[in-house]
Image: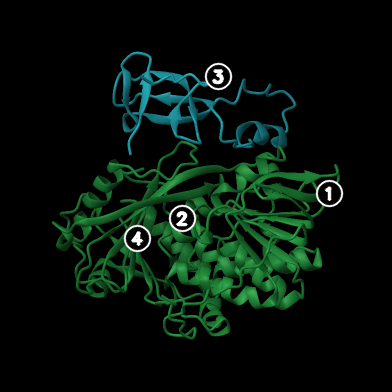
Chain colours: A green, B cyan
Amino acid sequence: MTPVRLKPGFLRLDRLWEERPLERHYEVVIIGGGIHGLATAYYLAKEHGIRDIAVLEQHYIGFGGSGRNTAIVRANQRTSENVRLYKEGLALWPVLTDELDFNLMFFNCGNLNLAHTEAAENSFRLSINTAAFNGVRSEYLDREACKELIPALDVSDRPRLPILGGMYHPPGGVLRHDAVVWGLAKGASPHGVSIQQGVEVLGIDTDGARVTGVQTSEGPIGCEKIAIMAGGYGARVCAMLDIELPIHPLTIQAMVTQPLKPFLHHVISSGGYHIYANQTLKGEIACGAHMDPQVNYTTDATAWYFKHQAEAMVDILPCLAGVRFLRIWAGLADMTPDMAPILEGNLEFDGLYLDCGWGYFGFKSGPVTGKYMAEWIAREECPEILRPFGLGRFLENRYMGETAATMKYGHYD
Amino acid sequence: MTFRITCPVCGARDIYEFTFGGHERGPRPDQKELSADAHFRWAQFRTTRPEPQEEWWYHGAGCGVWFSTWRDPATNRERRPTGEDEAS
C-alpha cells in the first residue's frame, strides 16, 4: 500500500530538520546534541555566518540531560555573575519561541523556594538582594503568604521541617524541554547545520598545539574548532585529551505521579527536604531529588529516592498522600566545587572550547549560553558575561558563592 | 536498580548504608611551600574516565568503619581494574 503523504503541518510527517550526509571536514564540530550544542550551532549559523558545522550526538538529540531535567527555569541564584546570565536566559524563552516558530510551552508560573531554618531565610535574603540589584523580581514571603499562594501547602508546625517562609520568584517557570531541543534543531538546520545522530566521539585529534579533528564511530572528521558541549559527559570527553577538571558527574533522579486536577500552580522547591516539584500541563506532579554522591556515568534510578520523594512531598503537601508515581528516570549532573559552570576557550589546545560543569543548571542556561559561546567561537574573544566562569578561578581560590544557595543543609543531605 | 558495597566487616550491604568519601587522591602534598594552585589540583582536579577507581566509603549505618574499595563509574558497580568482580 502506498503510504499516504500529507503536507507537513498539523501531523508533521516530515522531519523538523534535514538529514545530511556526514562530511569528512567541518569548520566547527560540536560534541553533544543537547540544548547547549544545538543552541550554539543555531547562533553560530544565524548570527555569525558560520554554517559549516556538525553537531555530533551519540544517541539522539535530547537523549541526555536535555531530555531528563525537570525543565524548571529561574534567575534567583546567589551571585550577581550567575543572575546576570540566567536573567538574560529567562528573557530569551519568549524570543526564541517567536524566532523558531515553535511552541516551547513556556509556562511562566513563578517559583516558590521554601525555608525551614533561619539559615535558609538568611540565604534567601541574600539571593533576594542580589536579584534586586540585578533588576530581577524576587521577594520574601512569610508562611501565611506562602499558604495564600499555594493553599495545599501545610504551613503548620506538624511537618518534620516546618515551613518558615519562602523566596517567591515570579519570572521563573517551566518549559517543555523536548520542544526546546526540537525547536533549536529545526531553527539550525535551514542555516546549514548538520545534525548527526548516532555518531559517537571516540577521540580528539591534535597536532600538539591545536585540535585538528575528532575520531568517531563513523570514522575520522577533520575540523578547525571543537566545542565540547556534552553535558554530564563533558568530563569524559575531556579525559580523551587527559584534561583534568574539578568535575564530578553524578546521577540525579526525577519522577512523575499520575495526572491530577490542577492544584499546584507554581514551581515549588525546598532545600531542606531536597525536593523541587511542579504540576505539568498534563496534571502530573513532576518532582526531582538530590543525587547519589559517588561519581557515576549510569542513569540508574533507585527505590530509595521514590521513598524519599514520597515522604517529603506528602509531608508538605498532605493532599498527595496515596497518589501514585508513574515513572522515574535519571540523568547526569556534572557538579563543580562551587556549583557554577566551567566555560573555556582554547583550553590547553587552540580551537578547543569547553562548556560544562553546569550541574543541574544546564537546562535553564542552555540558549543564552549557546548564544555567547557562539560569539566566543566566532570572534575568538570571550564575551564579557562569560568571563567569570573560567577554569582558572579554582586555581586562584576564587570560588563562586553558589553553594550558599540553600542546598546544603537538612536531614536529607 | 539498587546495588551494594562490600564492607570488609559486614560484607555486601545496600549502598544507602554507606557514606561516600571521595576517590583515592594519593598522599596529601607536603604543606611546606604548597601553593593554592597545587593544593587545589590535588584536592579537586581529576580526569573522570569511565574505568574503575579506588575510593573511600564509610559504613555509617553498620559497623562504622572507613575502608577503600574499587568501583567502576561506567557501571556503578564494584570492580577491580583487572576486571574480576569484587562483589558477590
- Sequence-earlier tag: 4 or 1: 1
Q: Crowding near pointer 4: few (<14 within 10 Å), some, many (20+)?
A: many
The residue identified by callout 3 is: B82
Residue A141 drawn above or below residue B44: below
At 44% across and 77% down in the image, what residue appears?
Answer: A2
The residue identified by callout 2 is: A405
Q: Crowding near pointer 2: few (<14 within 10 Å), some, many (20+)?
A: some
Residue A265 screen position, x and y as percent:
29, 74
The residue identified by callout 1 is: A210
Q: Crowding near pointer 1: few (<14 within 10 Å), some, many (20+)?
A: some
Gap between marks 2 and 1 measured at Cα: 38 Å
Secondary structure beneath dot 4 equals: strand
At 48% across and 52% down in the image, what residue appears?
Answer: A404
Secondary structure beneath dot 1 equals: loop
Residue type at tag 4: Ser
The residue identified by callout 4 is: A269
* Disc number lying in front (2 or 3): 3
Residue A152 screen position, x and y as percent:
19, 68
At 78% across and 67% down in the image, what residue appears?
Answer: A378
